Image: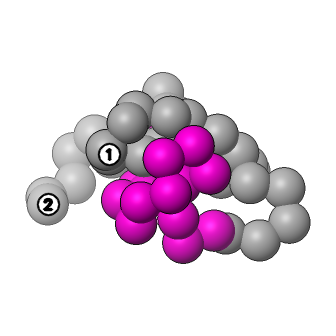
Amino acid sequence: MTLKLKCMNCGYKFMPKSRVPTKCPYCDRNSLRKDDTASSLISDVGREK
């Protein structure tokens, strides 16, 4: 399973190749979050948050 990240500041989406970065490569801010993919949204159906 590949990890997709999204910057909450500028909206840039990318998949890191070797390690998980702490900063966005586009805007250089610490606002990265895991991007919601279709499979992750489906697997979260019925779970309490």
Query: Is residue 47 or residue 40 the one in the foreground?
Result: 40
Q: Residue at x 48, y 47 (%)?
A: 27
Q: Which mark is residue 46?
A: none
Residue occupied by mark 1: 8
Q: CA distance from mark 1 to mark 2?
A: 20 Å
Name the N-terminal-most of marks 1 and 2.
1
Q: Residue at x 77, y 71 (%)?
A: 19
| Mark 1 secondary-structure assignment | loop
Q: Where is 22 relative to 24, above or below?
A: below
Magenta stretch in the rendered image: 21-35
Q: Is residue 46 left or right of residue 19?
A: left
Tell me if mark 1 has few (under 14), some (14-19) or many (20+) residues whose alpha carbon lies within 10 angstroms of its own.
Answer: some
Camera-near label (1 vs 2) is 1
User: In the rendering, at what x and y percent does residue 47 appear?
Assistant: 22, 54
List the single residue furthest toward the left: 48
Q: Is residue 14 left or right of residue 18?
A: left
| Mark 2 secondary-structure assignment | loop
User: In the rendering, at what x and y percent does residue 31 appear?
Assistant: 36, 59
Q: Is residue 10 left or right of residue 18?
A: left
Q: What residue type is disc 2 on?
A: Lys
Q: Which mark is residue 49?
A: 2
User: In the rendering, at what x and y percent does residue 14 appear?
Assistant: 64, 40
Q: Quadrant of the C terminus?
A: bottom left
Q: Residue at x 67, y 69 (%)?
A: 20
